[in-house]
Image (tube, grey):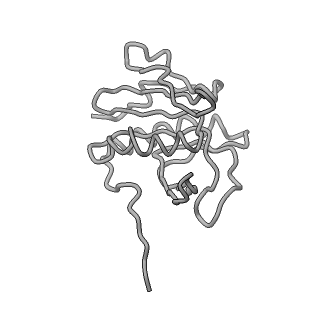
């Protein structure tokens, strides 16, 4: 028997890393309760066939998916409409490069990267350049411009910067 295992995400997130994810999910959950969309924490995986024929499985720190019936086993096979990653020392490079590229190739409309150390959020929006999907940095939100924090593709959802980082040392 041959096992073809591939490490796709790292384990062992810090309590602060987990707190930001929980804070985000808690803020969004009730705001989506009357819609077909759902917010998920880092226990949901997405599996896609890439352009080169390979298969990638990713587990975002948080995602919003409006097509929750598209599953194969325990994995979603469609792309969510929003993905959030919280940087940690072991995943920062992966989240900013390979994982971001996977999300771009799957045409996920909005991608946030949260930096715990800087208390900042990079907000990326997907658009097209010469028919190719590309992420554009729309804003980097910090405490100074925290009133600007919002989900681009879910404008009715309110995100509070201070609440997002609540309980973080």
Q: Quadrant of the C terminus?
A: top left
Residue 64: x and y in percent read 59, 42
Q: How many marks?
A: 0
Q: Quadrant of the N terminus?
A: bottom left
Residue, far bottom: 1
Q: Nearer the viewer, residue 44 or 21?
A: 44
Report the residue at 61% width, 56% height from top: 76
Q: Nearer the viewer, residue 11 or 28?
A: 11
Report the residue at 41% width, 70% height from top: 5
Decide if residue 81 is on the left or right side of residue 143: right
Report the residue at 50% width, 16% height from top: 148
Q: Nearer the viewer, residue 37 or 48?
A: 48
Q: Nearer the viewer, residue 5 or 27?
A: 5
In the image, residue 30 above or below residue 75: above
In the image, residue 66 above or below residue 110: below
Q: Quadrant of residue 125?
A: top right
Residue 23: x and y in percent read 46, 37
In the image, residue 57 above or below residue 138: below
Report the residue at 50% width, 57% height from top: 57
Q: Quadrant of residue 36?
A: top right
Q: Quadrant of residue 7?
A: bottom left
Decide if residue 3 is on the left or right side of residue 92: right
């Amino acid at each position: 028997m041959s096992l073809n295992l591939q490490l796709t995400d790292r384990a062992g997130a810090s309590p602060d890393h987990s707190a930001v994810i929980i804070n985000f999910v808690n803020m969004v959950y009730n705001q989506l309760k009357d819609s077909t969309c759902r917010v998920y924490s880092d226990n949901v995986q997405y599996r896609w066939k890439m352009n080169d024929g390979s298969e990638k499985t990713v587990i975002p720190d948080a995602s919003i998916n409006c097509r929750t019936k598209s599953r194969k086993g325990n994995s979603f096979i469609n792309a969510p409409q929003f993905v959030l990653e919280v940087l940690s020392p072991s995943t920062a490079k992966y989240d900013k490069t390979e994982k971001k590229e996977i999300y771009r190739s799957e045409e996920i409309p909005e991608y946030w990267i949260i930096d715990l150390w800087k208390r900042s959020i990079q907000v990326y929006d997907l658009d097209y350049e010469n028919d190719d999907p590309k992420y554009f940095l729309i804003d980097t939100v910090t405490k100074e411009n925290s009133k600007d924090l919002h989900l681009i593709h879910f404008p009715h959802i309110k995100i509070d910067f201070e609440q997002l980082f609540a309980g973080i040392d």
